[in-house]
Amino acid sequence: MNRFAGAEGNSGRPERVRPVMTDDTAVAAQPEILRYAAFAARPEGGNPAGVVLDATALSAQRMLMIAAEVGYSETAFLTAGTSQGAYDVRYFSPLAEVPFCGHATVASAVALAERTGPGRYLFTTAAGDVPVEVERGADGLLRATLTSVEPHVGEVDAADVAQALALLGWSAADLDPALPPRIAYAGARHLVLAVGTRERLAGLDYDFEGLASYMRARDLTTLQLVWREAPEVFHVRDPFPVGGVVEDPATGAAAAAFGAYLRERGAVTAPTVLTLHQGEDLGRPGVLKVELSAEDPRVRVSGTAVAIP
Protein backbone atom coordinates (compact mmCIF):
# COMPACT_ATOMS: atom_id res chain seq x y z
CA MET A 1 0.00 0.00 0.00
CA ASN A 2 1.24 3.48 -0.81
CA ARG A 3 0.51 4.72 2.66
CA PHE A 4 2.43 5.73 5.76
CA ALA A 5 3.60 2.53 7.40
CA GLY A 6 5.96 3.56 10.19
CA ALA A 7 8.27 0.61 9.63
CA GLU A 8 10.47 1.44 6.66
CA GLY A 9 14.22 0.90 7.09
CA ASN A 10 16.30 1.68 10.16
CA SER A 11 15.89 5.46 10.10
CA GLY A 12 12.39 5.31 11.59
CA ARG A 13 11.14 7.50 8.71
CA PRO A 14 8.06 5.94 7.10
CA GLU A 15 6.99 6.48 3.52
CA ARG A 16 5.19 9.80 3.35
CA VAL A 17 3.13 12.04 1.13
CA ARG A 18 4.56 15.54 0.72
CA PRO A 19 2.03 18.32 1.24
CA VAL A 20 1.41 21.07 -1.29
CA MET A 21 2.80 24.26 0.27
CA THR A 22 1.03 27.60 0.07
CA ASP A 23 2.91 30.89 0.00
CA ASP A 24 2.30 31.31 3.75
CA THR A 25 3.64 27.88 4.70
CA ALA A 26 6.59 28.12 2.34
CA VAL A 27 7.97 31.26 3.95
CA ALA A 28 7.14 30.31 7.54
CA ALA A 29 10.14 29.77 9.78
CA GLN A 30 10.94 26.10 10.24
CA PRO A 31 10.83 25.15 13.94
CA GLU A 32 13.19 22.60 15.44
CA ILE A 33 11.66 19.19 14.86
CA LEU A 34 12.84 16.39 17.13
CA ARG A 35 12.31 12.71 16.39
CA TYR A 36 11.93 10.04 19.05
CA ALA A 37 11.05 6.35 19.14
CA ALA A 38 8.52 5.85 21.95
CA PHE A 39 7.98 2.66 23.94
CA ALA A 40 11.39 1.43 22.84
CA ALA A 41 14.99 1.27 24.06
CA ARG A 42 16.52 1.77 20.62
CA PRO A 43 15.70 4.05 17.68
CA GLU A 44 14.70 1.13 15.44
CA GLY A 45 11.93 0.00 17.81
CA GLY A 46 8.63 1.36 19.05
CA ASN A 47 6.67 4.15 17.41
CA PRO A 48 8.43 7.18 15.89
CA ALA A 49 7.00 10.55 16.91
CA GLY A 50 7.80 14.06 15.88
CA VAL A 51 8.15 16.62 18.68
CA VAL A 52 8.16 20.41 18.41
CA LEU A 53 8.96 21.82 21.85
CA ASP A 54 8.10 25.43 20.93
CA ALA A 55 5.03 25.75 18.70
CA THR A 56 4.15 29.25 19.89
CA ALA A 57 4.26 30.81 16.41
CA LEU A 58 2.65 27.95 14.51
CA SER A 59 -0.89 27.94 13.14
CA ALA A 60 -2.93 24.75 13.00
CA GLN A 61 -2.41 24.66 9.22
CA ARG A 62 1.33 24.90 9.68
CA MET A 63 1.29 22.13 12.29
CA LEU A 64 -0.58 19.86 9.90
CA MET A 65 1.90 20.63 7.14
CA ILE A 66 4.82 19.79 9.42
CA ALA A 67 3.18 16.54 10.56
CA ALA A 68 2.66 15.52 6.94
CA GLU A 69 6.27 16.34 6.11
CA VAL A 70 7.60 14.41 9.11
CA GLY A 71 5.42 11.50 8.05
CA TYR A 72 5.11 9.75 11.40
CA SER A 73 1.75 8.64 12.74
CA GLU A 74 1.75 11.71 15.02
CA THR A 75 3.76 14.82 15.76
CA ALA A 76 3.26 16.71 19.04
CA PHE A 77 3.37 20.49 19.21
CA LEU A 78 4.03 22.06 22.64
CA THR A 79 3.44 25.58 23.88
CA ALA A 80 4.69 26.45 27.36
CA GLY A 81 1.98 27.37 29.87
CA THR A 82 2.07 29.95 32.63
CA SER A 83 3.33 27.58 35.33
CA GLN A 84 6.51 25.53 35.42
CA GLY A 85 6.17 22.16 33.74
CA ALA A 86 2.80 22.99 32.17
CA TYR A 87 2.31 22.78 28.40
CA ASP A 88 -0.52 23.04 25.94
CA VAL A 89 -0.11 20.15 23.50
CA ARG A 90 -1.67 19.49 20.12
CA TYR A 91 -1.23 16.29 18.13
CA PHE A 92 -1.38 15.96 14.36
CA SER A 93 -1.27 12.90 12.14
CA PRO A 94 -0.27 13.40 8.49
CA LEU A 95 -3.96 13.93 7.66
CA ALA A 96 -5.69 15.48 10.67
CA GLU A 97 -5.50 16.68 14.26
CA VAL A 98 -6.22 14.04 16.91
CA PRO A 99 -7.39 14.78 20.47
CA PHE A 100 -4.72 12.76 22.24
CA CYS A 101 -1.70 10.61 21.39
CA GLY A 102 0.08 8.49 23.98
CA HIS A 103 3.32 7.71 22.20
CA ALA A 104 3.90 11.35 21.22
CA THR A 105 3.19 12.31 24.84
CA VAL A 106 5.86 9.89 26.07
CA ALA A 107 8.29 11.14 23.41
CA SER A 108 7.62 14.81 24.30
CA ALA A 109 8.06 14.25 28.03
CA VAL A 110 11.37 12.44 27.51
CA ALA A 111 12.56 15.20 25.18
CA LEU A 112 11.75 17.78 27.86
CA ALA A 113 13.44 15.71 30.57
CA GLU A 114 16.61 15.40 28.51
CA ARG A 115 16.82 19.18 28.53
CA THR A 116 15.60 20.04 32.05
CA GLY A 117 15.98 16.81 34.00
CA PRO A 118 13.45 14.19 35.13
CA GLY A 119 10.34 15.50 36.82
CA ARG A 120 6.62 16.13 36.53
CA TYR A 121 4.78 17.77 33.68
CA LEU A 122 1.17 18.66 32.98
CA PHE A 123 0.03 18.42 29.37
CA THR A 124 -3.23 20.18 28.55
CA THR A 125 -4.70 18.41 25.52
CA ALA A 126 -7.96 18.54 23.59
CA ALA A 127 -9.05 15.49 25.60
CA GLY A 128 -8.20 17.06 28.97
CA ASP A 129 -5.28 17.39 31.37
CA VAL A 130 -2.71 14.58 31.25
CA PRO A 131 -0.09 14.48 34.04
CA VAL A 132 3.24 12.93 33.02
CA GLU A 133 6.13 11.84 35.22
CA VAL A 134 9.63 11.11 33.91
CA GLU A 135 12.20 9.07 35.83
CA ARG A 136 15.57 7.62 34.93
CA GLY A 137 15.65 3.85 35.26
CA ALA A 138 18.44 1.57 36.42
CA ASP A 139 19.24 0.97 32.74
CA GLY A 140 19.97 4.68 32.34
CA LEU A 141 16.97 5.27 30.08
CA LEU A 142 14.31 7.88 30.74
CA ARG A 143 10.85 6.43 31.29
CA ALA A 144 7.70 8.53 31.02
CA THR A 145 4.42 7.61 32.71
CA LEU A 146 1.24 9.36 31.62
CA THR A 147 -2.03 9.35 33.52
CA SER A 148 -4.99 9.26 31.16
CA VAL A 149 -8.16 11.27 31.33
CA GLU A 150 -11.03 9.35 32.92
CA PRO A 151 -11.87 6.45 30.59
CA HIS A 152 -15.16 4.83 29.69
CA VAL A 153 -16.23 1.69 27.86
CA GLY A 154 -19.36 1.21 25.76
CA GLU A 155 -21.25 -1.41 23.79
CA VAL A 156 -20.90 -1.75 20.02
CA ASP A 157 -23.63 -2.90 17.64
CA ALA A 158 -23.30 -6.39 16.23
CA ALA A 159 -23.73 -4.98 12.73
CA ASP A 160 -20.80 -2.60 13.29
CA VAL A 161 -18.64 -5.48 14.49
CA ALA A 162 -19.57 -7.55 11.47
CA GLN A 163 -18.68 -4.69 9.12
CA ALA A 164 -15.32 -4.15 10.82
CA LEU A 165 -14.51 -7.85 10.57
CA ALA A 166 -15.40 -7.88 6.88
CA LEU A 167 -13.09 -4.91 6.24
CA LEU A 168 -10.29 -6.71 8.09
CA GLY A 169 -10.93 -9.94 6.20
CA TRP A 170 -11.69 -11.69 9.51
CA SER A 171 -14.69 -13.68 10.70
CA ALA A 172 -16.63 -13.90 13.95
CA ALA A 173 -15.02 -17.31 14.52
CA ASP A 174 -11.65 -15.58 14.81
CA LEU A 175 -12.72 -13.64 17.91
CA ASP A 176 -12.00 -14.55 21.53
CA PRO A 177 -15.40 -15.00 23.23
CA ALA A 178 -13.88 -14.15 26.63
CA LEU A 179 -13.09 -10.62 25.43
CA PRO A 180 -16.11 -9.34 23.46
CA PRO A 181 -15.93 -6.28 21.19
CA ARG A 182 -16.36 -2.90 22.86
CA ILE A 183 -15.69 0.78 22.24
CA ALA A 184 -13.07 2.01 24.73
CA TYR A 185 -12.04 5.59 25.39
CA ALA A 186 -9.16 7.16 27.34
CA GLY A 187 -8.65 10.35 25.37
CA ALA A 188 -9.61 8.88 21.98
CA ARG A 189 -12.11 6.24 20.84
CA HIS A 190 -10.97 2.74 19.87
CA LEU A 191 -12.82 -0.39 18.79
CA VAL A 192 -11.40 -3.34 20.75
CA LEU A 193 -11.39 -6.65 18.89
CA ALA A 194 -9.74 -9.64 20.58
CA VAL A 195 -8.76 -12.70 18.55
CA GLY A 196 -8.17 -16.25 19.67
CA THR A 197 -4.75 -16.89 18.11
CA ARG A 198 -1.48 -15.08 17.51
CA GLU A 199 -1.58 -16.27 13.91
CA ARG A 200 -4.85 -14.45 13.29
CA LEU A 201 -3.42 -11.25 14.76
CA ALA A 202 -0.34 -11.57 12.55
CA GLY A 203 -2.51 -11.90 9.44
CA LEU A 204 -3.48 -8.24 8.99
CA ASP A 205 -4.19 -7.11 5.41
CA TYR A 206 -7.24 -4.87 5.35
CA ASP A 207 -9.27 -2.56 3.11
CA PHE A 208 -7.51 0.75 3.79
CA GLU A 209 -10.04 3.17 2.29
CA GLY A 210 -13.02 1.14 3.46
CA LEU A 211 -11.79 0.95 7.04
CA ALA A 212 -10.91 4.65 7.04
CA SER A 213 -14.47 5.54 6.01
CA TYR A 214 -15.91 3.15 8.59
CA MET A 215 -13.80 4.68 11.37
CA ARG A 216 -14.51 8.29 10.41
CA ALA A 217 -18.25 7.59 10.51
CA ARG A 218 -17.90 6.27 14.07
CA ASP A 219 -15.28 8.73 15.38
CA LEU A 220 -12.72 5.96 15.94
CA THR A 221 -9.03 6.77 16.16
CA THR A 222 -7.71 3.21 15.84
CA LEU A 223 -8.85 -0.37 16.06
CA GLN A 224 -7.25 -2.06 19.06
CA LEU A 225 -6.64 -5.62 17.86
CA VAL A 226 -5.42 -7.89 20.65
CA TRP A 227 -4.40 -11.42 21.51
CA ARG A 228 -3.97 -12.59 25.08
CA GLU A 229 -0.74 -14.54 25.64
CA ALA A 230 -1.04 -14.75 29.44
CA PRO A 231 -3.36 -13.29 32.11
CA GLU A 232 -1.54 -9.95 32.11
CA VAL A 233 0.40 -10.13 28.82
CA PHE A 234 -1.08 -9.12 25.46
CA HIS A 235 0.03 -8.61 21.87
CA VAL A 236 -1.68 -5.71 20.11
CA ARG A 237 -1.91 -4.08 16.68
CA ASP A 238 -3.55 -0.78 15.74
CA PRO A 239 -4.68 0.06 12.19
CA PHE A 240 -4.77 3.86 11.82
CA PRO A 241 -6.05 4.65 8.30
CA VAL A 242 -7.89 7.79 9.47
CA GLY A 243 -4.46 9.28 10.15
CA GLY A 244 -3.07 8.17 6.79
CA VAL A 245 -1.15 5.34 8.46
CA VAL A 246 -1.58 1.64 7.71
CA GLU A 247 -0.63 0.68 11.26
CA ASP A 248 0.58 2.42 14.40
CA PRO A 249 3.69 0.63 15.79
CA ALA A 250 2.92 1.50 19.46
CA THR A 251 -0.23 3.20 20.68
CA GLY A 252 -0.34 4.67 24.19
CA ALA A 253 -3.87 6.09 23.94
CA ALA A 254 -5.25 2.73 22.84
CA ALA A 255 -3.26 0.97 25.57
CA ALA A 256 -4.93 3.17 28.20
CA ALA A 257 -8.37 2.52 26.69
CA PHE A 258 -7.68 -1.22 26.57
CA GLY A 259 -6.63 -1.24 30.22
CA ALA A 260 -9.94 0.41 31.12
CA TYR A 261 -11.76 -2.17 28.99
CA LEU A 262 -10.11 -5.10 30.78
CA ARG A 263 -10.89 -3.65 34.21
CA GLU A 264 -14.52 -2.90 33.28
CA ARG A 265 -14.96 -6.43 31.92
CA GLY A 266 -13.47 -7.98 35.06
CA ALA A 267 -10.88 -9.65 32.81
CA VAL A 268 -8.12 -8.55 35.21
CA THR A 269 -8.14 -7.65 38.87
CA ALA A 270 -6.85 -4.24 39.88
CA PRO A 271 -4.39 -3.21 41.10
CA THR A 272 -2.26 -4.77 38.42
CA VAL A 273 0.29 -3.96 35.74
CA LEU A 274 -0.22 -5.23 32.19
CA THR A 275 2.44 -5.74 29.54
CA LEU A 276 1.50 -4.97 25.95
CA HIS A 277 3.78 -6.01 23.09
CA GLN A 278 3.27 -4.05 19.89
CA GLY A 279 5.16 -3.45 16.66
CA GLU A 280 6.68 -6.92 16.35
CA ASP A 281 4.82 -7.58 13.09
CA LEU A 282 6.20 -4.31 11.69
CA GLY A 283 9.80 -4.98 12.69
CA ARG A 284 9.60 -2.18 15.31
CA PRO A 285 9.04 -4.06 18.60
CA GLY A 286 7.95 -2.00 21.57
CA VAL A 287 6.68 -2.58 25.10
CA LEU A 288 3.94 -0.64 26.87
CA LYS A 289 3.24 -0.98 30.59
CA VAL A 290 -0.35 -0.34 31.67
CA GLU A 291 -1.06 0.22 35.36
CA LEU A 292 -4.59 -0.18 36.70
CA SER A 293 -5.61 1.09 40.12
CA ALA A 294 -8.45 -0.23 42.26
CA GLU A 295 -9.30 3.32 43.40
CA ASP A 296 -8.40 5.72 40.58
CA PRO A 297 -10.47 5.18 37.40
CA ARG A 298 -7.71 6.71 35.29
CA VAL A 299 -5.09 4.51 33.63
CA ARG A 300 -1.31 4.95 33.74
CA VAL A 301 0.76 4.05 30.69
CA SER A 302 4.55 4.06 30.74
CA GLY A 303 7.46 3.45 28.43
CA THR A 304 10.92 4.57 27.47
CA ALA A 305 11.78 6.78 24.51
CA VAL A 306 15.03 7.44 22.69
CA ALA A 307 16.07 10.03 20.13
CA ILE A 308 16.21 8.99 16.46
CA PRO A 309 19.50 10.24 14.98
Image (tube, rainbow, N blue to C red):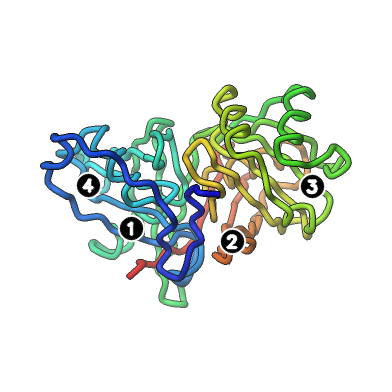
Q: Nearer the viewer, residue 252 or 34?
A: 34
Q: Residue at x 43, y 55 (%)?
A: 15
N-terminal of the pair, mark 1 or mark 2, is 1
Is label 3 in contact with label 2 (beta carbons under 8 Å)?
Answer: no
Q: Secondary structure at mark 4?
A: loop
Residue 127 placement (x, y as % from top left): 43, 31
| CA separation in Å, label 3 and label 2 | 18 Å
Residue 206 placement (x, y as % from top left): 67, 43
| CA separation in Å, label 1 and label 4 | 11 Å
Dot 3 surroundings within 10 Å: few (below 14), some, or many (20 or more)?
many
Dot 4 surroundings within 10 Å: few (below 14), some, or many (20 or more)?
few
N-terminal of the pair, mark 4 or mark 3, is 4
N-terminal of the pair, mark 4 or mark 2, is 4
Q: Residue at x 60, y 35 (%)?
A: 190
Q: Secondary structure at mark 3?
A: strand
Is label 4 in contact with label 2 (beta carbons under 8 Å)?
Answer: no
Residue 282: mark in rendering: 2
Is label 4 in contact with label 3 (beta carbons under 8 Å)?
Answer: no
